[in-house]
Image: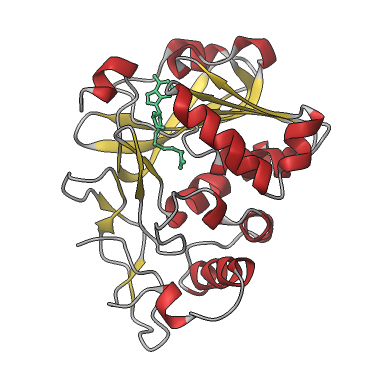
Amino acid sequence: MSSDNLACPSTSDLRTQPVAALDKEGIGPAMTSIPMIACSTSLSEHHSGGSGTNKNKQMVEQLQRYGLISSKKVVEVMETIDRALFVPDGTPAYVDSPMAIGYNATISAPHMHATCLQLLEENLQPGMHALDVGSGTGYLTACFATMVGPQGRAIGVEHIPELVASSIKNIEKSAAASLLKGGSLSVHAGDGREGWPEHAPYDAIHVGAAAPEIPQPLIDQLKPGGRMVIPVGKIFQDLQVVDKNLDGSVSIRSETAVRYVPLTSRDAQLKGY
Ligand code: SAH
């Protein structure tokens, strides 16, 4: 099973059976409760005409049609930030699958981006602070920045300096460029397991790589009332939702089973884990 090939206009069989939310190439699929659309042709093949922006809109419409996005704000932001600007040249941008971005990393599948945006939506309101750990291509950091707006703060932390540089170039081409220029969006090279204390506490923390356990600095940098979404585990991983209560205690629940690349050291990642 794979989670590729989102769009299939002739196929309306929305399958709710467990499917792959595969965020790492080369490993078998993890079982998830996320519904998928099974078909053999991709969105880009069905909609070969039209601009990138139109195709991006069609991808978002398909995700909505198949019940993978229900939030209006998430629709808006995913329509605003064109995914094609964030995938490497020659990579199919609008297929619902993770794609390799080099350095043993991937850009997550659109349905996983949608899931994380929806889980964090209440904590991505204008003026809020968001941290994206393992920001990779910068796609979600750009989405977060767009949602929190110029009065807010969106920080990406990524430990591969080349990915930091390319993510900044991607963002510069996107609708979030003015936020980068204005300083409410920034991407930094660093070990995301330490968070980014400078702009803490955060209303929203997203971790785009799987941690064996939740790093304490990230819990510490979460604001009371804040929410973190983090894949936790080694081979079998859960997407965990960590809510910091107003008294400082935390409540943790598992949203779904997933498979992401590990949150690890740069050396381990470059050696192939
Ligand atoms: N969410 C991003 C990337 C997901 S891949 C996207 O969709 O584009 C996970 C990313 O986490 C990779 O880019 C990897 O280099 C990064 N990463 C892994 N361990 C890290 C660490 N300790 N600190 C910072 N980044 C890390």
- 263 relative to 137 in the view: left or right: left
- 230 relative to 266 in the view: left or right: right
Q: Can residue 125 be seen?
A: no
Determine the image quadrant of residue 142: top right
In the image, residue 156 lies at what x, y percent? 57, 28
- Please tell me whether residue 111 is drawn above or below residue 7 in the rendered image: above
- Please tell me whether residue 268 is drawn above or below residue 142 in the rendered image: above
In the image, residue 118 lies at what x, y percent? 56, 49
Nearer to me, 209 or 101: 101
- Coloured how? secondary structure
Count of marks overlaid on the render: 0
Identify the image quadrant of the C terminus: top left
Please report the residue visible at 37 percent of the width from the left and 31 percent of the height from the top: 209
- Taking the image in four quarters, ligand 1 sits in the one at top left
Determine the image quadrant of residue 238: top left
In the image, residue 63 lies at what x, y percent? 49, 67
- Please tell me whether residue 69 is drawn above or below residue 226 in the rendered image: below
Residue farthest front in this picture: 89
- Please tell me whether residue 264 is drawn above or below residue 256 in the rendered image: above
Please report the residue visible at 44 percent of the width from the left and 56 percent of the height from the top: 111
- 252 relative to 186 in the view: left or right: left
Residue farthest bottom in this picture: 10
In the image, residue 107 lies at what x, y percent? 41, 45
